[in-house]
Each structure stands twice: as C-alpha cells, then as structure tokens.
Image (cartoon, rainbow, N blue to C red):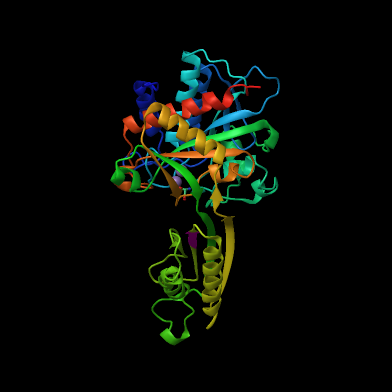
Amino acid sequence: MELANKERIKHHFKTFSKFTATPNEGMTRYSYSPEDVKTRTYIKEKMEQYGLTVREDGLGNIFGKLEGTIENAPSVLVGSHFDSVPHGGNFDGPAGVIAGLEVAALFQEQQIKPAYPLEVIAMIEEEGSRFGEGLMGSRGMNGLIDEEDFHTIRDKDGISVTEAMQQAGLDPTLPKHREQKTMKAFLELHIEQGPILEEENISIGVVDTIVGLTQLEVTVEGKAGHAGTTPMDRRSDALITASSLVSELPNLVQDESNGTVITTGKFAVYPNGANVIPQKVVFTIDLRSGEEASIRRVMQKAKTLIASHQKNGIHTSIHQHLYMQPKELSKEVRSSFKESTEKLGISYIPMQSGAGHDAMIFSDFTEAGLIFIPSKDGLSHCPEEWSDLEHLAQGVDILFETAKKLTEAEIG
Ligand code: HGY
Ligand code: MN
Ligand code: MN
C-alpha cells in the first residue's frame, strides 16, 4: 500500500536542486546565501499550501505547524537541514525536509486532525560549511549556543551570523531557544551516506546510535619570507610543519576500533603566494568514533603531537568548534519506526550512523529518531550523491505512519 506521492517528491527535489551557487559542480548552498533564500521561500510556500502555519526563529530555522486538538500540546517535529557542504549532493538534508513536507501533504490529503501538533522543520547550518559551527541550527534552537556567540561567529569574509541573517532579510532578534516542553518527538529521514543498505539490498536503516565527534581548527604560525633570498636553515615555514602534522594524523587512530576516523578537510595557507614562505596555515581535524574514550585518547595524542612541533620559530594553537558524545536514539521512536516498516512490509535493519545529524542534538531534549534510505554506491558529500525515488517514497511512508501514531491521543 503506497502513500507518498512520488510526483510531488520528485518536483520538490528538482526545485531544491536548482538553488545552488555551483550549478555545474554539485550543490553548494550556504546558510543565509541567495540560494538559501530561494530554497526557504519555496519551503514556506509549500508549508502554507499544505495547511501549515509558518514561522522562522531567530536563527532562520523554518517551522510549519499543523495544530492539534489538545491545547498547548508538545509537537511531533519532522524534518532535517537544507544547507550543504561545498560541491555536495542534492539529497543530504533535503531528503529529510522534503519527506517532512510530504508527510504534511498526506495529513492534509487524508484530512487528519492530530491530537498533538505536527511540525515540519527545515534547519540551517547543520554542515557548518559557512560558519564552521556544525549542527548550529539544532544546537541554537536547543539553547546550546550563547546569544552573544551569534555576534562573534563569523564566516571566511568576517560576516557574523547576525549580520548574515540581516543581509538575507531574516530577523535575528526573534526567539532562538525552543522550550523543551514544546517537543514530543523529533523524526528525521536522512540518506545513509554509506554503502550498507545498498549492498544488503535493504530499503530502510533504523538508526540506534550516532557516533561522537569533535571538530578542531589548528593554527600553525611561522614567519613569512622571500622564497629566493631566505636560506633554508633560517626559515620558520608554517606549511612544512602543518603538512607534516597532517600526514601523521592517520597514525593516531590506527590502534582504535569502533569506527574511529580522522580527517583533515580544510587547509588554508597564508599569504598563499608562490614566492612567499608561508607565514600561517589553518587546517581542520574532524575526529569521530562510536566510543567516547577513543575520541578522548586520540584528541590527547593530537594535542601532544601538535605541541611537539612548537620549535624553531613555529607556534601552534588549537580551537575546538564542536564536541559531541556518541548518542543512543529514542527506544520508543525506534520501535515505532520498526512497527511502521513491518506494517508496510518494508525491509529494514538497525544501524549505527558514522555521520552526525540534527537528531543527535534533539536526542538530549526529546524522543529523537532517525531513519536512513540507501545511497547509490554509498556516495555523499559529492555531486554524485543519489537516492532512488522508490526508497524516498518508502521512507516517507514510514515517517507518515510513525508521525500519525505519535500525534494520536494516548488511549486511557
Ligand atoms: O559531517 C557530518 O557528519 C554531517 O554531514 N554534517
Ligand atoms: Mn552532510
Ligand atoms: Mn546531513
């Protein structure tokens, strides 16, 4: 029995996919960018079309609410993020936002009057691509970031979150923090971003746990100089030190298990002139593990390694942007998802997520659940990212069944 309307889903994807800053090289949609504004306009239009009351918070997160029959009852939130990594794919984030829109359309089509409100949610800055602060939309909403930080967190052009919102026509003075008591559950559909579901020919992953992660920014400072006239033994070359540090990072995780991985994804050289000895290098470390002890051990090793390179005029420093413990998601929501898959006859397996998700933030404040759909060739964070419409529709059906159940009045 199929519920989701594939044509509607397909149209949403086609529309979202147009709003990119790099049309011939994948999806690049940074928070509060012109691409963000076009996407949010479309999302709000659809929310209204599906009978939802629309609002934006002081971070630009978008909410579409279908009121329930119980006065002031907490909402069941369904959604994800709509920002992207640079040159990413069309599904990471939007799959969950579009699934939320389709759930709302099904509630409207079937004239469902829920006891608890249904809220579709579309969040900003989950990737941290613009401001370097991952999960910023969900962390800010749940009160995990201080108000003044939004005046000091800046993008690479020195524009703060507050200024960027104003430039996009958003109102940063609106309330940011959402009371915990206003949330009954948070449901997210996301692409797996890995190969398991496709290899096992399974349609749905019901996520039990999400790995812990930390994101560090390392600064290596030396001394700029003339590439031609400065003798080799009189240099403090920041790039030589930084590149030797980065090449040693993989060794720090080789004795760890539990899916411990380490990545340097950003590496910026200053002043970046071909005939100038690099004065400064700033690079990132993204460290993840299913085991918090592994994260702490590797972080300590990294700090020791980085400090040991402070010599011959080289200075190093580390700034920690994000630290998340591994998270177990709601047992209640996981069993609800499983009942829905069984009811609909859709195959599923329990999984761990190696990627971070907004669900890991909500899991500390409400019953949070996350389902995966297969990623073609396991690819993500690249233009080749793809998920089949069939799997998206199956994921929507499960979200719809589960949202219906969780918004019904409790019996007795
Ligand atoms: O990096 C992540 O795990 C997610 O894509 N933000
Ligand atoms: Mn991502
Ligand atoms: Mn994502």
Give the magenta part as a residue range: 284-288
Residue 226 lies in what quarter of the image?
bottom left
Taking the image as shown, residue 397 lies to the left or right of residue 369, namely: left
Our reading of the magenta stretch's main secondary structure is: strand
Say which residue appears at 42% left-offset and 34% top-offset. 95
Query: Residue 58: where, in percent of width, then height?
Result: 65, 35
Of residue 101 and residue 157, the one placed in the foreground of this image is 101
The quarter of the picture where the N terminus appears is top left
Task: Please tell me how many numbered marks the rendered image carries.
Answer: 0
The quarter of the picture where the C terminus appears is top right
Say which residue appears at 41% left-offset and 68% top-offset. 250
Of residue 251 and residue 411, the one placed in the foreground of this image is 411
> Does the magenta run of residues contain 219?
no
Residue 219 lies in what quarter of the image?
bottom right
Vertical placement of 11 versus 374: above or below?
Answer: above
Vertical placement of 25 versus 298: above or below?
Answer: above
Say which residue appears at 36% left-offset and 36% top-offset. 347
Say which residue appears at 44% left-offset and 71% top-offset. 255
Of residue 223 and residue 172, the one placed in the foreground of this image is 172
For residue 80, say whether it is visible: no
Vertical placement of 116 versus 292: above or below?
Answer: above
Query: Residue 257: where, in percent of width, then height?
Result: 44, 64
Query: Residue 131: where, in percent of width, then height?
Result: 54, 49
Taking the view exactly as shown, the residue that stands out farthest to the front is 412
For residue 164, say whether it is visible: yes
Of residue 198 and residue 149, the one placed in the foreground of this image is 198
Vertical placement of 299 versus 73: above or below?
Answer: below
Taking the image as shown, residue 307 lies to the left or right of residue 17, namely: right
